[in-house]
Amino acid sequence: MGYFKDIFDGGLSLVEGMGVTVRRLFRPLVTVQYPRKKIPLSSAYRGHIELKIFEETGTHKCIVCLNCEKICPSGVIKVRGEKLKEKGPKTLTGYAIDFSICSLCGLCVEICPTSTLQYSREYELVGETRADCQIDLLERLSKQIEKKSEEKKTQGIAA
Ligand code: SF4
Ligand code: SF4
């Protein structure tokens, strides 16, 4: 009796599965052909943290207060700064994060007194080792600034 019931249940499950497949065939697609097509990211998306570029200065506003480094519950952040001028705040000389242990809690973003930290929109990071998760945010920022200035130059030539 159990043997025939198993066959019946298996057949029923197969029919139900095929029913779902057939119904889905006639509904609009909910997936895209990534990476050829991409869907817009949610505004709530949190990539790894990054240094913000301010329009008025063309760079970040980090004052090396170390608040972010101290508050990070996972010890992800390592900030380095040097006193380049006798007066005034230190100059940022290094900002490294280990994204492999970041919980994206957001405490660093919230505590930054100059609002110079934000979540990046990065979602295509790949790596084979944990070392690939070590990100130099200052170096990354320099590249972004360089790219922006190149784009401006190109737009200037095209205009
Ligand atoms: S989001 Fe949280 S865990 Fe990640 S770097 Fe900032 S404070 Fe640390
Ligand atoms: S909290 Fe903000 S200003 Fe202070 S070290 Fe971190 S990024 Fe720089």
Image: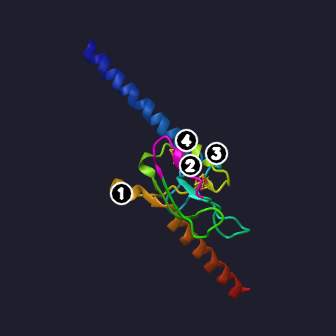
Q: Residue at x 60, y 47 (%)?
A: 28
Residue at far bottom of view: 157
Q: Which mark is residue 105?
A: 4
Magenta-colored span: 64-77
The amino acid type of the residue labelled 2 equals Cys
Label 2 CB, ligand 2: below 8 Å?
yes
Residue located beneath label 3 in the image: 110
Sequence-first tag of 4 and 1: 4
Confirm whether the magenta stretch covers residue 6: no
CA distance separating discs 1 and 2: 22 Å
Closer mark to the observer between disc 3 and disc 4: 3
The amino acid type of the residue labelled 4 equals Cys
Which image quadrant: the C terminus?
bottom right
What kind of element bears circle 1? Answer: helix
Which image quadrant: the N terminus?
top left
The amino acid type of the residue labelled 1 equals Ala
Label 4 CB, ligand 1: below 8 Å?
yes
**Answer yes or no: do the residues labelled 3 and 4 have beta carbons within 8 Å?**
no
Seen from the viewer's position, the closer of residues 41 and 45 is 45
Q: Residue at x 63, y 46 (%)?
A: 111
What kind of element bears circle 3? Answer: helix
Sequence-first tag of 2 and 3: 2
Q: Is residue 159 above or below residue 103?
A: below
Residue located beneath label 2 in the image: 68
Residue 155 drawn at (x, y percent): 69, 81
